Amino acid sequence: MNFSFSIENWYALSSGLSNKTDWHLWSKQSNHNWNLPLPKPIKIPMMQARRMSEPSRLAVEVGLELIENEHIDLAIFTSRHGELERTYRILSTLNQNTEISPTDFALSVHNTAAGLLTIIAKQTIPITSLSANVDGFQQGLLEALPILHQTNKKVLLIDFDGKIPDIYQTLIKPTIPAYAIGYILTKGNQFNCQNIEKTSTVYQTDYPQSLAFLHAYLNKQQQFTLQGSLQNWQWILNA
């Protein structure tokens, strides 16, 4: 499998990282304090932001920033864990034989962030929401390809995740507490990618794929390999 695309724009939010300048500085540092506060939403109305989980709030804020004054043909949201914190809260409530919060119930589905983006933006954008273990970002790119092969089409891809509840941390290794990274993708050959067999040399293994990709992109890495579940992904930057 071999494919290519170009990036028209990007935006990201995480702990202590609220603009592109912050992220460029992050990409040049050897470590980052992921315990810093998360950025406060600017574009999401306060009443709606209060009901949203941290990861969805970040994802929607990133989406609103990127689609402003843009025509998007498809929005793809990828998240390994989705609304895991909210789902765990529901399960804990059921275990205690108490009533479930209507807000938790309504906003516990995996496509919560995708749906909220279209509602808040008041745009009827076709959307899809994916989960593919550690390969979510890569599978999101593959989902975008049929649209990108057409002429003058733009795809918004947002990868995001939140904190892992303590009870799951024996099974899931937490990396970044909460983040959201968005890209506006277009047809082109700025980046080429192909799947390869598992190798020992991979780029930024402590980061989720989308974050490792951003790190390589900002550092203008000409060639790098991202870690996948059953295979790896080899990237070449042509610009």
Image (cartoon, grey):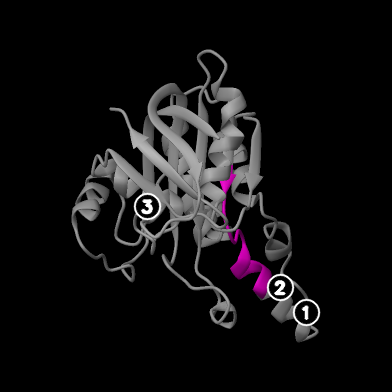
In which quadrant of the rendered image does the C terminus lie?
A: top left
Looking at the picture, how far across and down is residue 63, in whole percent? 48, 40
The quarter holding residue 139 reads: top right
Instruction: Please report the residue visible at 64 percent of the width from the left and 36 percent of the height from the top.
Output: 127
Q: Is residue 46 visible?
A: no
Which is nearer the eye, 112 or 193?
A: 193
- At 67% across and 54% down in the image, what residue appears? 110
Q: Which type of secondary structure does the marked residue at label 3 adopt?
A: helix
**Sequence-earlier tag: 1 or 3:** 1
Element type at mark 1: helix
Judged from the image, the secondary structure of the residue bearing numbered disc 2 is: helix
Residue pointed to by mark 2: 90
Query: Which quadrant of the rendered structure holds the N terminus?
Result: top right
Q: CA distance from mark 2 to mark 3?
A: 32 Å
Query: Can residue 79 be seen by looking at this rendering?
Result: yes
- The amino acid on which the numbered mark 1 sits, given as a three-letter code, is Leu
Q: Label 2 to label 1, Cα distance in Å?
A: 6 Å
Amino acid under label 2? Ile
Q: Is residue 86 magenta?
A: yes
Q: Earlier in the sequence, mark 2 or mark 3?
A: 2
Decide if residue 81 is on the left or right side of residue 57.
right
Residue beneath label 1, please?
A: 94
User: Which is closer to the viewer, label 2 or label 3?
Assistant: 3
Q: Check residue 212 in the rendering and tell me which mark sits there, or answer none.
A: 3
Residue 190, given in percent of the width and then of the height, sits at: 36, 27
Name the one closer to the observer, 167 or 65: 167
Q: Which residues are magenta?
A: 77-88
Instruction: Determine whether label 2 and label 1 are within 8 Å by CB.
Output: yes
